[in-house]
Structures are given as structure tokens and as C-alpha cells.
Image (spheres, coloured by chain):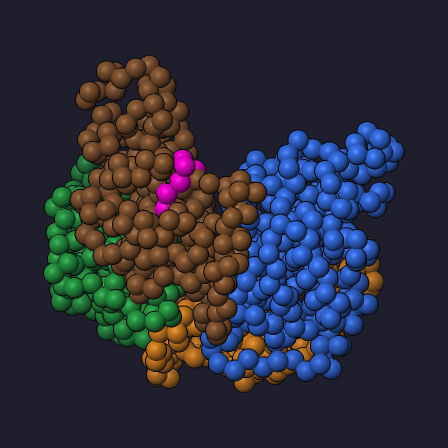
Chain colours: A brown, B blue, C green, D orange
Amino acid sequence: MSSLSDYPVEVQTEVKQLRETVAKLHAQLLRWNLVVWTAGNVSQRLRSADLMVIKPSGVRYEYLTPESMVVTDLQGNPIDGAESPSSDTASHAYIYRHMPEVHGIVHTHSTYATAWAATGRNIPCALTMMGDEFGGQIPVGPFRLIGSEAIGEGVVQTLQQYPQSPAVLMRNHGPFTIGSDAEDAVKAAAMTEEVAHTVWAAEQLGDVIEISPEDIGRLNDRYRNVYGQH
Amino acid sequence: MSSLSDYPVEVQTEVKQLRETVAKLHAQLLRWNLVVWTAGNVSQRLRSADLMVIKPSGVRYEYLTPESMVVTDLQGNPIDGAESPSSDTASHAYIYRHMPEVHGIVHTHSTYATAWAATGRNIPCALTMMGDEFGGQIPVGPFRLIGSEAIGEGVVQTLQQYPQSPAVLMRNHGPFTIGSDAEDAVKAAAMTEEVAHTVWAAEQLGDVIEISPEDIGRLNDRYRNVYGQH
Amino acid sequence: MSSLSDYPVEVQTEVKQLRETVAKLHAQLLRWNLVVWTAGNVSQRLRSADLMVIKPSGVRYEYLTPESMVVTDLQGNPIDGAESPSSDTASHAYIYRHMPEVHGIVHTHSTYATAWAATGRNIPCALTMMGDEFGGQIPVGPFRLIGSEAIGEGVVQTLQQYPQSPAVLMRNHGPFTIGSDAEDAVKAAAMTEEVAHTVWAAEQLGDVIEISPEDIGRLNDRYRNVYGQH
Amino acid sequence: MSSLSDYPVEVQTEVKQLRETVAKLHAQLLRWNLVVWTAGNVSQRLRSADLMVIKPSGVRYEYLTPESMVVTDLQGNPIDGAESPSSDTASHAYIYRHMPEVHGIVHTHSTYATAWAATGRNIPCALTMMGDEFGGQIPVGPFRLIGSEAIGEGVVQTLQQYPQSPAVLMRNHGPFTIGSDAEDAVKAAAMTEEVAHTVWAAEQLGDVIEISPEDIGRLNDRYRNVYGQH
């Protein structure tokens, strides 16, 4: 099916909701200083069909509306919307195809997360907030060129090695985060930048104390099972 | 008494006021860039009963209202409110039980204060503002896991060793601040981040000049007794 | 012609549009934290005549209106407007005369870009965003005094050596950026500060990994030809 | 005369204007991130009498109104207003008495300016903006306790040694800036923080290139005489 009108009504209804949700969440990228100009994007995968809703390419944030969001299939082919989809669409699609539990993806070039990515160093786990949210280090993924699904492939490979982490820092590029929906992935993007900034600042003061794997396990277990996140 | 309607009218009136006050002060955490997403909380202890009003767990700041605030007793048991109380409730309760003069507590993961906490280093007293407000160094407390009153216990132990300081940086975690009411504790949280950032920046320039204990004593004495703070 | 009323109607119409555009874009300098007080300026060259619209000198941003913008010829002589033009007018004029494809210029003293300028070091190309937007390093230009066209001359000389870059960091001074219109140059100014900050932060963490010239070429080619920028 | 009603009408009129001006300028301290909570103050000296208008002590910025501003004589004695004047009043008064050309004073603890103050290092002149506005280095003044005119005395002594500079960084404390009126001093406070931040960032990258005394002289001369700033 190559047109949204070919899909069942429930799909069209979900698309309508997700256009609102995804458009609105881009304001959260600005709210938490994760993006400059047009440099970031959010998508959410539908529950009712193998489709996703994603930011249009090269549109300034103040001009984003629910209507300007683009609907594509999970190969990245446009299904609905007047604009072209984000140049990262093929990578979002790759991640959704290979990680079926993921329903939200965010990509930014947020300053401190990207600084770690430019050095190729994982962010060491030195904060209880990292134990909670990331279950350990935030890993750096491989260097990949933009414009194909190569970035998505690098994200999936890296997350398979760090199954607790909802974030990967693509080398020389910036963070990708995943979640059970787009809001969850935006939260992970905000947390990634915050811990990237904090551990960066800590390193300038002297030796950073890393948290032991046992305590990381306890933190992450409580966060997921008692606090009920993820 | 396990329901708010069992309490005298004056208690119900104070609860109503404090729901407003505590909800509103969360906006100050955002205003001074002390928190990201849901990562921080404010509470205030009542004057008219052994109860406190505290932030609900996991609610985004833009959705916080006076009605969403939670009332608990000083063991952390919920007394009133539709939401679950913050996961730090047991620690707030511990502090109120062991420090009766304290009527406000704030916890954040503010960036630079938490950076010091990740290295285990006290912030040296190099600013007149620290002499005024903190009476010397801002101490780092012990590493403690989240979810029990263990954090509160670590806060109280540390503050007993640094009786002039309204702030303690829990190791690998973040700052807790206390005050005569919630606003006073929010002020201490804002000041903690500001001096953490300033002394951090000073260390990058070269040798920081610490203020002598005699001058710290003079600053703190004037601040409390002449200027009338605390 | 020394008065705007001597010009054809189409010129007067374009002036009216550009006064709106240029006044409004100064708000974007504030939005992205590129300027403090009055320290920055935007101009755009007309398509219909050899004129430009530029910020008035020494006016605080909250008082900028379309009417307060100044029109000058490409020697920098005032043609229309009650205020004096920016003290950088002669340099904007020099750039427009020597780079006919340029129709927008922005000058700021944004913090991290200017920090690189104070050390005389080019920003190394360590981010895919730099490969995209700048086609490699962001170069530092010569030291030049303010008030004549000497700065404009230094900008043109440096950009001739770095033809892919829309930005040059004038030594001990700050960035100048160019574009196909003023909005394009404002985007380049925002991106310049962002990558200056990110690579600065990366250097504090350890060895920054530079992107190879081959990969920079691939990124820049795709950005211009496939993505359609510049 | 110890009551404002004893003064001529023109003085009462100027007081009314300056209450508006000074109250409004405190919003600019927040706008440029120069202050946290209540930690900063602005004053302006009248032209029509030996009086000044200054911020009240310990009032949060959102509660500042023209009416809450305090009028004192140039010994710091309150003449009009319901609140107590800022604890820095005696120092403002000392500066006005000893520098008659000064009609505006601002004190902040802005982060990076105060970081330099905590190390006792002057900010080297490495930016054309510093040559323009400060005529060279921004000097550090002596350590002085709060609450008497001792700080004002240290400010005056230091500015006598650096007659081009409108700013002094009091050691371990924070910047004081002066101007021909309060707005001029607020501008100097904003510029002080900006150059403090920029040169701080430059030092983290490697060797900062200082501007030669000859070029500083040329910049400062043009700024004052051609551009018309002081």
C-alpha cells in the first residue's frame, strides 16, 4: 500500500495522533538544548501498522506542525506528507526493523554527548542516574556516513553489545536514543546529554570514581522493576 | 491517622497552602537549570502536624499541579494524593525525623554539583558567597543506593560534621539541601550549583585561593546575624 | 543615487521586505545565544540593486525594528534610515563587492568560536556536521583593526583559501559567516558556535579523532548535492 | 534632609524616574545570566541631588518593583523606601563619593568573572571587544569583607590603577562595574562576564594570543572617540 488512504481507519487515526505527538516532542529537544537550527529528529513507530511518523527534512523547528510530519513505511518509503522525510529516515527504519520492541527513536548532535563521540570514548558510569537509566557506560558506535541505513546498522550492532543502554554515541557524529515510544526516547536523549555534561565536568576536576558493576546492577534493577521505567 | 480527613482543619489548611508552595517551587528548579526531565524533588514539612508535602514520582514538570503533590507522614507513608510519592520520600522523611529544625528539603542532580560528587571532592571555600551561605566547604557524603532511607541517613551524618552547611553532595549521585522551609532549601540548591560551577571554572584557570577559616567565620557570622539569613 | 526615493519601485519593495527579514533575524542571534547586548550584526544584499540592509550601530536588540535598519550602497554609504549603520558596514560592503554570490553576512562574538579565534587555531574537522556544513576545518583569519574595510579584506582572503567554508574566525575578534541570503548566514553562525563548543569540549576529554579528507569530501558532496544545501 | 519630601520637586521627579530605570535594569541581570536568586545589585546616582537609588536587600528578582527600590544619601543612609537597602550600599556610596563622574554601579557574582576572581588573576586582553570596552586587562581587586565600605575602597583603588577599565573583579568575591548611568554599568557587567567566559574557554585550548598595547590603544581610542562609547 503506497497511500495512507489505503490503510484501515485505525491506522489513519493512529497516524493523526502520532503527528501531534511527534511534532510536539521536537519542542522538547529545544527545551532541553539538545538541538540547534534543524539538527535533530524524532520518530515514532505505529502500533497498528508497519509505518512510522518522522520529522521532515531541513525545516526549522518553529515551522514544524503536525501536518508537516512525514509518514513512511519501515523501508523509509514516503506514504503520506507534503515534505521529504529526514535524511536519517533509512536509519530509523533499519532500527525499527531490527529491534521490534523499539517504538521511538531520537537523534541529536547535543554538545557534550557529541564531544564524547568525537574522541571515541564511552562515557564511564560514574552517576547513579546512569546506573538507573543506562545500566552502565554509554557506548560509542562506529563511524558511518550519512544518507543510507549504515548509521542504523551501527546503532543496532552497538546496542546489541550494550543491551541495557537506550543510547549510543555514533563516532564523530552524535547520539541516537531509543524507547518504547517517542517520548521515552526523548527522555533518554535529554538524560544522555545531562550525564555526558556532568561526567565531562567531573573529569576536569580529577579522578572520576566509577560505580561498581554490582551497584550498577542493583540501581538498574530497582529502576526498571520497582520504579517501573522501561 | 491514615487519611487527611482525620486531621484537624488547621492541618488541612496548611496542606492546601503547602501543595501550592511546593508545586510552585518546582518551577524554580527549572528556572535555575537545576533539573532535567523529572530528576529532582522538593518537599516541605508541616508546622501543624508530623506530615510533609512532596513531589509525585516520575511526573514531568509541566504536568505538576498543587493537586498532584503527595502528602505523607514522617515514615514516608502516603496520607493523601492520587500519585505515588517521589522515590526519595523515605530519605526526606529520615532527614525530617532526625533534624527537627529542618522544614524544607530539595534534591537535584544539578550538573556541576554532581560533577564534584562524582570525584568525591568537597568544594573548597574560595568565594565570599560560600562563606556567607555555606560557612565553608560543601561536603561530599557517602555512596548510598536509592530507594530506602539510606540516603537520608548519609545526608544527616554528613551535615552533623558540617553544621554550617545547608548542602551535601551525595557521592556519585547529587546534592541534597535543607532549609527552614522549602523556599530556603531551593535557594540553597540554586546557590550550591552556582558555587559548584564557579569554583569548577576557577580550577581550570590555575590555583584557587581559599578563604582563611577566620574570614569564613566573619562572613558567615555577619550573614546569619546581621543580614538575618537562616 | 543617494536617496532611496531615486530608486525604482521594485528596489523600494525589496528594501521593505529585507528590513523585515534582517530585523527579525537578529532575534535568532539571541535565540541561539550568539550575542550579548549589541555585539553582533546581520546584513543582506539586495537582488534588485547594489544595496544592502544592515543593523544600526549601538542599538540594543529589544529596540531593533524594521524601520531602524539602515540601507547603504556597496561602498557603505548610507542611502536610507535614521540611524548610523553598524561600525562593521565597510567590511560587509567589501565582502559583497568581492564575493558576488554572497547575499547574506553575519558577524558575532559568540563565546566558543571567539575562544578559538583568541588562540589562532583552526577548528579541526572532527564532526560529520562540520563535514556537511563547512567542508573541513573552520579557518582563523588575520588580526585586523575595526572601523575600516580591513576586516572584510581579511575575511575574503581567508575564504578564498577555504572555499568550502561559510565561516572564518577573525583572530582575537570573532566569527564572520556568509550565505546565499541573511538566513543562510545566520544558520552558519549558529552552526559555527555549536561545532566550536563541541570540539572545544572534546579536546578537554583527550585526543580528538579527525575525519579523513576523503570522508569529509563525501559528506560535503552529499550535503550540497543530495540534501540540497548551498 | 532625612526625608524625600524635604527635597525639591525636581529631585522627587528624578527619584521617580530612577526607581523605574533601576528596577527594570535588574531584569537585564537575569536576561544575561549574571545573577542567581538575589545575588546582585544595581544603583544609579541622581543628577539633581547627592542621592542614589539602589536595590533593596534580600528580595527575589521577580518581586522587585519601582516602589521597592530604596533611596539613600551618599553616606548610605536611607532617605526613602519601605525596605532596607542592599548590604553593598556603603560600598556603592563610597564609589560615588570618590568617583564623581560615575553615575551607575552594578555588582554581580557572574560565574566566569568570579572564577577569575577566585584565582586572583587579571583577565588578559586577548579580544578586540576587551580593547574596545575595557582598554586592556580586567583587573582583580583586593580581598575585602562584606558589610562596610571596605569593598568600595578596594574598587576605587583598583580602578585608579586601571583608569580605562569600567570593571574590577574583587578577589574571591565577584565583579563591580561602573558607568555614566546604571544602564552603562549593566552593559559593562554583561560584557565582563562574556569576555571572562571567552578568555577562560580560550585558555583551555592552548596559548592565548594577547593583543599588543599599541593595538589596544588604537581599539580603545576608536571606540571612545569615533564610535562614541566610553
Q: How many marks?
A: 0
* Residue D156 visible somewhere in the drawing: no
Measuring from the top left, give residue A135's x and y in whole percent.
Answer: 45, 53
Name the residue located 32 percent from the left edge and 19 percent from the top edge.
A12
Q: Is residue A179 magenta?
A: yes
Q: Nearer the viewer, residue D210 or A87?
A: A87
Tell me if residue D222 comes above or below residue B177 in the rendering: below
Magenta segment: does it hold B27? no
Instruction: Say if D132 sits above or below B166 in the image.
Output: below
Q: At which x and y percent is residue B216? A: 71, 77
- In this picture, is C154 found above or below B14? below
Q: Residue at x 53, y 53 (%)?
A: A218
Q: Is residue A82 above or below residue C172?
A: above
Residue C214, x across and y down, in percent: 12, 61
Q: Residues in magenta?
A: A177-183
**Dividing the picture into quarters, in which one does residue C106 lie?**
bottom left
- Side (left or right) of A166 relative to C218: right
- Looking at the image, residue B11 sits to the left or right of residue C96; the answer is right
Q: Quadrant of residue D128?
A: bottom left
Q: Please give the name of the residue rendered at 30% of the width and 71% of the height, measured from the top-left corner.
A: C207
Q: Is residue D197 visible?
A: yes
Q: Is residue D44 left or right of residue D34?
A: right
Residue at screen point 20% across, 63% down = C211
**Residue A175 in the image, given as x and y percentages of width and height:** 34, 51
